[in-house]
């Protein structure tokens, strides 16, 4: 993705997407007494928007433009935990689009403020509602799109603002029937309102197959033996697995699932419908789901490790103190799963854990002792992680 004009000189912020460093986590190895393994972190917070999702934001909009699905002046609408919204915002600025990000209420205020700084509109939705509910962030995004389609042409800034304000009011007041009416309305699509939908867009895993997986292969000189990655939309783990298993079939792919998500249950053989009955809210952001996106290919995942919120948060906090890497809760979950799996499975060789985003998105959450205490979490991180020693 990098197209430098000279050494360290670039023509666009999008040229900085990808090419993230691989860092040997030697202090983590020593602290947790990992033997016979080289553990590396793929530092996705080095993307310009601060997360792995910059990759798919760029790929999804490049794909939409190449297929004529959007025209200049279009509004991009996306249900997002926040990071995909930021990635889309960067690409939208470059291509002359506007962005409406629809986020569940549990997502950090830092993410919302960052999106607004990039000029995006933000709509907040309830967190604990089923995907099919008109109040879910998936369906609210569709309602925004339908209202913009009803305009019939390229919407002006004032029209976009009115649509966003209207939908946010309907959500806040829980006017489900009004939202359902918008969702069920017969409208003519236009190229001026588009939902990339990271959950079903093939450009999502393709971005990671062509960039993230290739980078890991090149950076390890083909020595990689196992990769640990969180499972959200599943684009990252699916794309990385496709590339690496093609290059080296013996590579093991280990998925990381937060407790309360359904991926681990489905991997064990439970039907998605039955697994959904066991879904429950969790605090860690950006990974896990209560349904199965079409971007997923569970056959590429060899094992799944389940991690609690407490374990994820304590490991993220420990990573900052041990390595100076400030990462989010999903990174903590991935690293916890990696250490646990390495020790219990006696993994040897080269292991790579994908660290999806920066901890600066969560300063007032997992890095805030008061928030941790108010939400029932211990701040005695070494004590929590002692079970891994």
Image: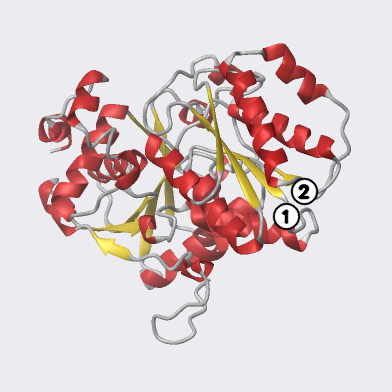
> In which quadrant is the C terminus drawn?
top left
174 lies left or right of 219: right
Residue at which label 1 appears: 73
Q: Position of residue 322 (x, y in %)?
A: 14, 50
On screen, 174 above or below 242? above
Residue at x-position 69% and y-position 33%: 163
On screen, 386 above or below 201? above
Farthest residue in the bottom direction? 6
Residue at x-position 42% and y-position 72%: 218
Residue at x-position 45% and y-position 39%: 112
Give the mark nearest the N terminus, 2 or 1.
1
Q: Nearer the viewer, residue 386 or 343?
A: 386
Q: Position of residue 183 (x, y in %)?
A: 77, 25
Q: Are marks 2 and 1 in contact (CB under 8 Å)?
A: yes
Residue at x-position 43% and y-position 41%: 113
Q: Position of residue 58 (x, y in %)?
A: 58, 59
* Residue 192, numbered circle: 2
């Amino acid at each position: 993705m990098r197209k430098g004009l000279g050494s360290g000189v670039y023509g666009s912020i999008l040229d900085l997407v990808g090419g993230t460093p691989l860092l040997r986590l030697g202090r983590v190895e020593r602290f947790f007494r990992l033997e016979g393994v080289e553990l590396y972190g793929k530092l996705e917070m080095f993307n310009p928007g601060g997360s792995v999702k910059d990759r798919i934001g760029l790929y999804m909009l490049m794909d939409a433009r190449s297929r004529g699905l959007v025209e200049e002046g279009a509004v991009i609408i996306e249900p997002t935990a926040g990071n995909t919204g930021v990635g889309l915002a960067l690409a939208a600025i470059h291509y002359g689009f506007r962005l409406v990000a629809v986020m569940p209420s549990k997502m950090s205020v830092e993410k919302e403020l960052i999106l607004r700084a990039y000029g995006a509109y933000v709509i907040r939705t309830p967190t604990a509602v089923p995907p099919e509910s008109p109040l879910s962030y998936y369906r609210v995004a569709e309602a925004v799109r339908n209202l913009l389609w009803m305009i019939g042409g390229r919407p002006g800034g004032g029209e976009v603002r009115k649509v966003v304000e209207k939908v946010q009011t309907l959500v806040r007041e829980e006017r489900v029937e009004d939202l359902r009416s918008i969702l069920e309305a017969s409208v003519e699509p236009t190229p001026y309102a588009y939902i990339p939908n990271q959950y079903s867009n093939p450009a999502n895993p393709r971005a990671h197959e062509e960039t993230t997986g290739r980078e890991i292969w090149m950076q390890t000189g083909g020595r990689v033996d196992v990769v640990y990655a969180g499972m959200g939309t599943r684009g990252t783990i699916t794309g990385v697995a496709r590339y690496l298993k093609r290059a080296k079939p013996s590579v093991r792919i280990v998925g990381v699932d937060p407790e309360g998500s359904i991926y681990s249950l489905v991997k064990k053989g439970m039907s998605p419908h039955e697994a959904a009955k066991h879904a429950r809210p969790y605090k860690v952001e950006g990974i896990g789901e209560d349904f199965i996106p079409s971007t997923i290919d569970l056959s590429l995942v060899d094992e799944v490790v389940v991690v609690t919120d407490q374990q994820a948060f304590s490991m993220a906090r420990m990573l900052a103190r041990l390595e100076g890497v400030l990462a989010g809760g999903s990174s903590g979950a991935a690293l916890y799963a990696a250490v646990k799996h390495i020790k219990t499975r006696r993994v040897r060789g080269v292991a790579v854990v994908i660290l999806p985003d920066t901890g600066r998105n969560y300063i007032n959450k997992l890095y805030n002792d008061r928030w941790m205490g108010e939400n029932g979490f211990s701040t005695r991180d070494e004590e929590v992680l002692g079970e891994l020693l």
